[in-house]
Amino acid sequence: KERAERAEGEAATWKEKAGQAEASKTALEVEVQKQKADIESQTSKLLDLQRTLQEKDAQILSQTSNDSESQAALTSLQKELEAERNLRASASSDFEKERISLQSKIESLTAELSSAKDAVPPPPPESA
C-alpha cells in the first residue's frame, strides 16, 4: 500500500512536471513564432530600404550625367562667346583702321581740292 501511494505521488509529480514541460514548450513555440514574424518584418523593411537606396543611386547617377552634359554645353557656349568677342574685337580694330585711312584720304582730297581751286584763275569779267 505504501509503495502504491509512493508510486501515485511520483506519477502525480511526473504528470505535473510533464504539464510544466508542455507549457514551457508551448511558450517557446509562441516565442519562436513571434521571433520569426519579427525577422520577416525586419527583412521586409531592409528590402524596402535597399530598393529605396537603389532608386536614389539611380537618381544621383542620372543627375550627375545631366550635370556633366550641362557643364559640357556651358563650356561649349563659353568658347563660342569668347570666339565671338575676339571676332568683334578684330572687326572693331579693322573698322577703326579703315576709318582712320578714309579720314586721311578725305583730308588729302580736301587739301588737293583747295589747291586746285587756288590754281584755277578767276573767270574773266563779262563785257557789257
Image (cartoon, rainbow, N blue to C red):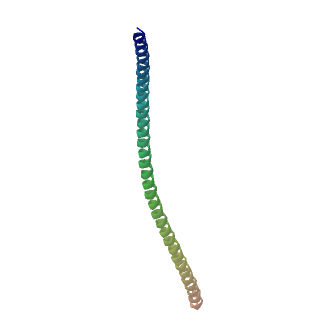
Position of residue 57 relative to residue 92, above or below, is above
Indicate left or right for 120 with 69 as reference.
right
Left or right of residue 95, residue 48 in this image: left
Looking at the picture, tell me which residue is in the foreground, 54 or 128. 54
Q: Position of residue 101 (x, y in %)?
A: 54, 82
The part of the image, by quadrant, that contains residue 51 is top left
Q: Give the vertical position of 118 relative to 18 (above or below).
A: below
In this rendering, the count of numbered labels is 0
| Quadrant of residue 113 within the rendered picture | bottom right
Q: Residue at x 52, y 79 (%)?
A: 98
Question: Which percent across, then down, holds residue 94?
Answer: 51, 77
- Looking at the rendering, in which quadrant would you find the N terminus? top left
Q: Nearer the viewer, residue 100 or 13?
A: 13
Q: Return the residue nearer the eye: 41 or 11.
A: 11
Image quadrant occupied by the C terminus: bottom right
Estimate the x, y position of residue 55 in percent, counting from the top left.
41, 45
Above or below 25: residue 9? above
| Quadrant of the image occupied by residue 114 | bottom right
Reply above or below: 88 against 28: below
Residue drawn 43% across the image and 26% down it: 28
